Image: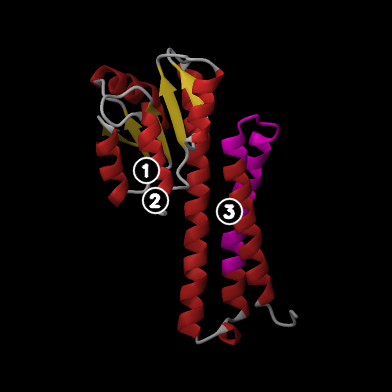
Amino acid sequence: MQKAKILLVDDRPENLLALEAILSALDQTLVRAASGEEALKALLTDDFAVILLDVQMPGMDGFETAAHIKRRERTRDIPIIFLTAINHGPHHTFRGYAAGAVDYISKPFDPWVLRAKVSVFVDLYAKNCQLKEQAALLRLRLEEGGGEQALGGALLGELSARLAAVEEQAEALGKQLDGAEDAGVAATAAHLERKLVGLRRALDAMRPGSS
């Protein structure tokens, strides 16, 4: 499976190096951006599983960068984790969540905690990619077959098995996240579950004898 891309945004090279050292164990593709402008440019062409975004940057700060990300249809659903070296209290944290962040972590942070949080979003991203692939395959087979009636039992069985594999992995991930306090993670997981249910219903509706 193709590696997920993680966008690291910080104006200080030493901070980017530290993030790369922490996240290298996840064996995903880490992409650097030294400013909000660079981050927005990277987001024009690549898809990312999660964005780690420094708040305090010269020029376009993290809040402004996040606002631009959330205004774009292509990028609005990408989870953003804010990283900040300062803590101005609840108001500052609220501003981060209001800008669309799913989490807000103060430096210095626990490397294990950060890695675990990022890992969850990478897993969710992978499941979403699998779901998109199955939906695309289903549409392709429908187009090739000329309609729902052309789908044979063997093909339906193949598609159902593929979807079942994704459902099983998503269920296992859901059990890991059960009781999680992170609202962003819960919302992303719920979105994935709704898409899985919708695709399963569409597939079941194509079976012979279905009403």
Whole-percent x, y for residue 46 in the image = 31, 48
Whole-percent x, y for residue 5 in the image = 36, 41
First-in-chain label (1 vs 3): 1
Q: Which residue is mark 1?
A: 68
Q: Mark 3: give few (<14), some (14-19) or many (20+) Cα within 10 Å.
A: some
Q: Is residue 91 above or below residue 161?
A: above
Q: Quadrant of the C terminus?
A: bottom right
Instruction: Say if mark 1 contacts mark 2, CB within 8 Å.
Output: yes
Q: Is residue 149 above or below residue 179?
A: below
- 156 with respect to 17 (left or right): right
Q: Secondary structure at mark 2?
A: loop
The three-letter amino acid code for the residue at tag 2 is: Arg
By secondary structure, the bulk of the magenta-drawn segment is best described as helix
Q: Residue furthest front?
A: 91
The three-letter amino acid code for the residue at tag 1 is: His
> Residue at image x 47%, y 67%?
136
The image quadrant of residue 69 is top left
> Residue at image x 26%, y 17%?
14
> Residue at image x 39%, y 27%?
23
Looking at the picture, tell me which residue is in the foreground, 158 or 106: 106
Residues in magenta, as a range: 159-186
Q: Secondary structure at mark 3?
A: helix
The three-letter amino acid code for the residue at tag 3 is: Val
Whole-percent x, y for residue 180 in the image = 66, 31
Q: Is residue 23 above or below residue 14?
A: below
Q: Which residue is mark 2?
A: 72
Whole-percent x, y for residue 56 in the image = 34, 22
First-in-chain label (2 vs 3): 2
Of badges 2 and 3, nearer the viewer stands 2
User: Residue 89 lies in magenta, yes or no?
Assistant: no
Q: Secondary structure at mark 1?
A: helix
The answer, for residue 4, to whether it is visible in the render is no
